[in-house]
Image: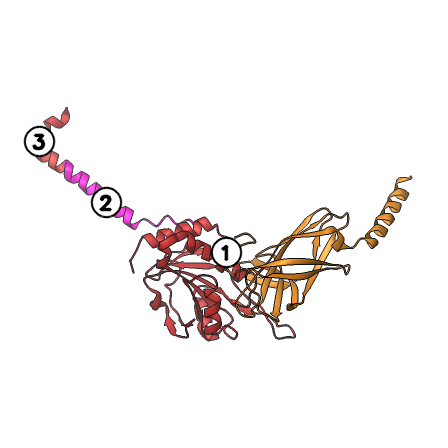
Amino acid sequence: MKLRHLSRISRITLLLMLLAIGLLLGGCQRSEPLPLRLTNVSGHMPDLDFRLTDDHGKAVTGADYRGKVLVLYFGYTHCPDVCPLTLAQLHVVMQRLGPLADGARILFVSVDPTRDTPQVMHTYVNAFDPRAIGLTGSAREIEALSKRYRTAFTREPGTADGNYEVSHGSAIYIFDRDGHARVLATPSAAQDDIVHDLHLLLSTGATP
Amino acid sequence: MKSPTLSCLLTGLLAAGGAHASAADHVHASHAWIRVLPGDLPAGAYVTLQNDGDQPAALNGARSTIYAEAMLHQSSNEGGTSRMSAVESLTVPAHGTAMLAPAGYHLMLMKPNKPVKPGDTVRLQLSFTDGSTLATDFLARPANAVDDSH
């Protein structure tokens, strides 16, 4: 009833106000954090940066993987239990993502560069997933990366036959297509949550 | 005060019985599989052990004609650090089960004398602290297997 009495100018003002509110809401939505299920580390960890050697023997840096959503995990090939389990689980995650997984890569960084040559790494990672990349390098280069993400690794005393284990951080780090650290997960994280968060990062942000 | 005498007698009888029946006689193995890794990398072997006996049994390792070494290990993840350590033995409680499963107890198999491929069956002699052994066939599964069925 009252609307009928509103002048044309008032109606236009109302319309403009509604439009402004709409724009504000839209703006808010864009800056709202992604509804990630796992530990959101956006803005709390440095962007991905390293100098390492990939499993083809090629020198690579973090920038070489921009455009891909990255799942980074430290481990070593002589680890018979936890490392292969984590990589097997990440393989299942990639399978569940379907074609979207083409936009993601698993970066398996060796904490045992003495034994993990690019060749060993190549056969190893490909036994798990075609989208897995093995990265190795000098102890110093690997240490630089592990320190960057506040983790560590220790070579344990070996046995008489020269075999030894390496204790290492078990965290899984997920980076978006721009190399920003977004998610920190433990190997025991629910697979559904890893799939969910990767799906979110793969469907948003910069495209390759 | 007859009961202490009786329980002493029973304990004696049970101990005597235990001397005849070995741990391996009472333990049944199932879900036995090996995660095969490329090349001659160490592999993890997993199995579920069920003890039907009245006495606990304790697994302390395994022998194999294919792998030069098989060690009982345990993985742990404390404070966000993955570690693996050798374990003397793993108890299978009387009328209970013990599981060797990914991210926990496992047998680390090293130095195969021939390539083991997914689909192969590898026989391991599981050994118990009383010296008895249990022959168990382990199914070799691919590196990216998650458990004994997937």
Specify the label residue A187 is tagged with.
Answer: 1
Q: x, y (%) of residue B6?
A: 89, 42
Q: x, y (%) of residue B63?
A: 69, 65
Name the residue at 61% across, 68% down.
Answer: B110
Q: Which quadrant, please, contains the C terminus of chain A? A: bottom left
**Mark found first going from the N terminus, 3 or 1:** 3
Q: Is residue B149 above or below residue A112?
A: above
**Mark found first going from the N terminus, 1 or 2:** 2
The mark lying in front, picked from 1 and 2, is: 1
- Position of B118 compared to A39: left or right? right
B51, A23: nearer the viewer: B51
Chain B: colour as depicted? orange
| Residue tagged 2 | A24
Chain A: colour as depicted? red
Q: Is residue A39 visible?
A: no
Disc 1 to disc 2, C-alpha distance:
40 Å
Where disc 3 sits, the SS reads loop
